[in-house]
Amino acid sequence: MKPRWQKSSYCSEGASCIHISATPEAVHITESADPSGAILTTTPADFGALLAVLKGEPGRTAPIEITFGAGNGAETPVHLHETSTPNTVVTTTRHQWDTFVLGARAGEFDHFRGRVEE
């Protein structure tokens, strides 16, 4: 079955964005413009921990690490990887990351943290 990818509603139509998909066992994260085509695979619990951190829930940490490249503009590179699979890196820009965070804070991805779509 082909995965159904979801992006934040804050991402413009036709723009490259971070996309999320799920199977019963895993949550998948990719960036439509990532030249490597990397797909980061994590558990629903770990993805839920990322959402909790993005929403500012106190005392939360996530095994998905976010690192920001040099610069501070919209095109600044942002890299996502899980500590258990550090060689799988999804690359996006600061602008796309910010639209994902806005969607996460608005609850647009909450359904991926527990009950996973099939």
Image: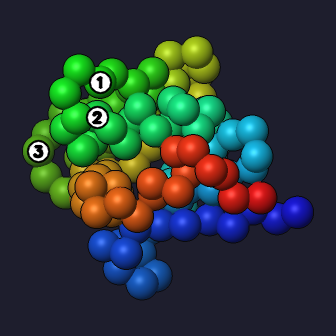
Q: Residue at x 28, y 34 (%)?
A: 53
Which of the two discs, 3 and 1, sits closer to the camera?
A: 1
Counting other residues with Cα less than 10 Å from the Cα at mark 3, is it few (<14), some (14-19), or many (20 or more)?
Answer: few
Please say if 38 is above or below 101.
Answer: above
Residue type at mark 1: give it.
Arg
Q: Which residue is drawn at 45% across and 21% down?
A: 63
Please say if 12 is above or below 67.
Answer: below
Could you tell me which quadrant the N terminus lies in?
Answer: bottom right
Q: Quadrant of residue 64?
A: top left
What is the secondary structure assignment of the residue under circle 1? loop
What is the secondary structure assignment of the residue under circle 2? helix
Residue 26 locus on image (x, y percent): 69, 40
Name the residue that disc number 3 marks: 72
Drawn side of residue 41 relative to residue 12, left or right: right
Q: For this rendering, which residue is in front, 83 or 75?
A: 83
Please say if 16 is above or below 105.
Answer: below
Name the residue that disc number 2 marks: 53
Residue 85 locus on image (x, y percent): 60, 20
Instruction: Say whether residue 76 is visible.
Output: yes
Q: Residue furthest front?
A: 115
Name the residue that disc number 1 marks: 60
* Measured Cα–Cα span from mark 1 to mark 2: 6 Å
Whether pointer 1 and pointer 2 mark residues with C-beta atoms closer than 8 Å, the reply is yes
Q: Residue at x 35, y 60 (%)?
A: 107
Q: Which residue lies furthest to the right in this view?
A: 1
Residue 81 locus on image (x, y percent): 48, 28
Could you tell me which quadrant the C terminus lies in?
Answer: bottom right
Residue 49 locus on image (x, y percent): 41, 32
Q: For this rendering, which residue is in front, 58 or 75?
A: 58
Residue type at mark 2: give it.
Val
